[in-house]
Image (spheres, rainbow, N blue to C red):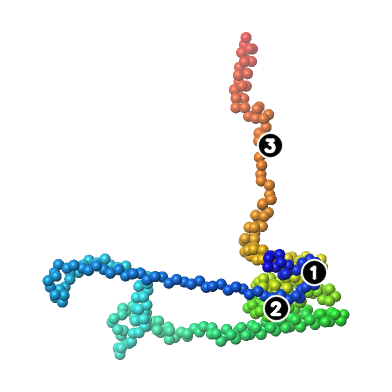
Amino acid sequence: MDKEKELEEIFGNDADELSDVLEDYSDFDNASSEDDVKKQPAKLKQKRSPLRHTPERDRDDEEYVPVPLNKRRRKTNESRKRRKRHERIENAGDLDDDESGNVEPSLAPLMASKAFVDRDFDEILPKRKGRSKKNDIELDKMYDEQASKVYQRMMEAGEKDISQNARGAHSSEKNQVQSWVMDKLEKAYLRESLLEHNILDAIKLWLEPLPDRSLPSHNIQEDLLKSLNDFNITTDHLLSSKVGRIVYFYTKSPRININIQRQAQQLVDKWAGPINGESSNYREKIMRMVHEANSGAPLPVAGTFDTIPTIRSGKRDDPYKNIKKTMARLKRTGKNMK
């Protein structure tokens, strides 16, 4: 499916605003990616040291004592240091006190005292228990029950308002449960479970016009659009729920408040961004907007006028002005003397 068809499937078009809001759409399966296989590092070949040739070959091996050679001290790497450190700690933990209460002399006094302190702390402090799988399963079950309850209550209130409005009666069921519903939608730990229980279908039902073409209250519109912005809604959610069409309707209808239209337009831009290949990063959006704003700006050009007028530069800025005046004065005085 190309971009234009996918956008039309999510947001609809201007001709049929809400005629096909309730059409079904099949979900697509995401292709699974293979896990990367980590290669194990090859083992290093151990180099064998050459045989030493001794000058005393006539002696027996048992009687011969080789002269110690000056060997280069081998550097210990981090793994060997770490292994030795663990061995010392394990040996310190396995110490047993004798009848006098003294420690075995094979361990340093400082390490022995540290082992005793660690052992005392382990006995005094309670062991920290982690979360068990049973608790996680119980939490997930509780979240699913709450999400299912929210979905059912929203659908019942929306359908009851539709039936009452069709009979010409006043409908206010959504206004009565609005505070309870918004309190549940604002809980961050319930949002994933709410999406799994098709909460977008219930939100779409609340935002749709009633049979007499009347819209929900201003508070319901504002709160539900704000909650939609908080949910982590993907393209698959939009294709299956068709909630994007009612949000797009709120951007075009002249009966909608200007602030509500801005909220709806932000949602449309946010949802259409991944389809158009745009990033959701705020910094990248600002940089792109600045680049687009500056792309059409004209570049500065050189002016057609002189920085200093020629009339001013010829008379007032002459460096020999004082000399000329002096010579002219001397000429006048010479004529007068004659």
Mark earlier in primary sequence (3, 1): 1
Mark earlier in primary sequence (2, 1): 1
Give the camera-side residue of 323 and 6. 6
Task: Return the residue found at the far bottom.
Answer: 99
Task: Return the residue found at the far right.
Answer: 168
Q: Residues within 10 Å of mark 3 (few under 14, many from 20)?
A: few
Give the camera-side residue of 326 and 67. 67
Tell me the quarter of the image containing the N terminus. Answer: bottom right
| Mark 2 vs mark 1, CA separation in Å | 24 Å
Label 1, on which residue? 16
> Which quadrant of the figure has residue 120?
bottom left
Label 2, on which residue? 199
**Callout 3 amino acid:** Thr
Task: Return the residue found at the far front.
Answer: 1
**Callout 2 amino acid:** Ile
Label 3, on which residue? 304
Query: Residue at (42%, 83%) from the top-left corner?
Result: 121
In this view, the mark in front (2 or 1): 1
Q: Residues within 10 Å of mark 2 (few under 14, many from 20)?
A: many
| Mark 3 vs mark 1, CA separation in Å | 58 Å
**Callout 1 amino acid:** Asp
